[in-house]
Amino acid sequence: MPDTRQATLYRMVLPEHTCPFGVRAKALLDESGFEVEDNTLETREAVDAFKAEHGVMTTPQVFIDGERIGGSDDLEQYLARNREG
């Protein structure tokens, strides 16, 4: 494999709640050999602002090579497609 692949992850980690889908997305990226820029959204306001800025309804959101892949289910499908090819 060439150089380490890069991914950017935005996930919710609030004092009272850590999103399990964000944890799953991080694990999937780590297991797939990505170098992950892990951005935690630590307040409800930060989560809401991120969702508004990117026009998405949910977190986590994963970006690979500047392309928004989506949430953890989308990431799982993306990784499966790219393993097959």
Image: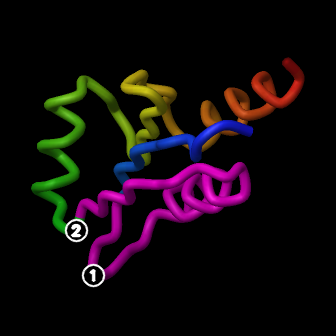
Q: Which residue is label 1 attached to? A: 15
Question: Label 2: few (<14), some or many (≥20) within 10 Å?
Answer: some
Residue visible at 34% across and 69% down?
13
- Quadrant in the picture for the C terminus: top right
Helix, strand or loop status at disc 1: loop
Q: Amino acid at mark 1?
A: Pro
Could you tell me residue 22's position as x and y percent? Answer: 49, 57
Question: Which residue lies most toward the top here?
Answer: 85
Tell me which segment is drawn in magenta: 12-41
Q: State the residue lying farthest toward the front.
A: 2
85 vs 58, nearest the viewer: 85
Let me know if residue 20 is in the magenta part: yes
Q: Residues within 10 Å of mark 1 (few under 14, many from 20)?
A: few
Residue 18 among magenta residues = yes
To which residue does mark 2 refer? 42
Does residue 48 appear left or right of residue 65 in this picture?
A: left
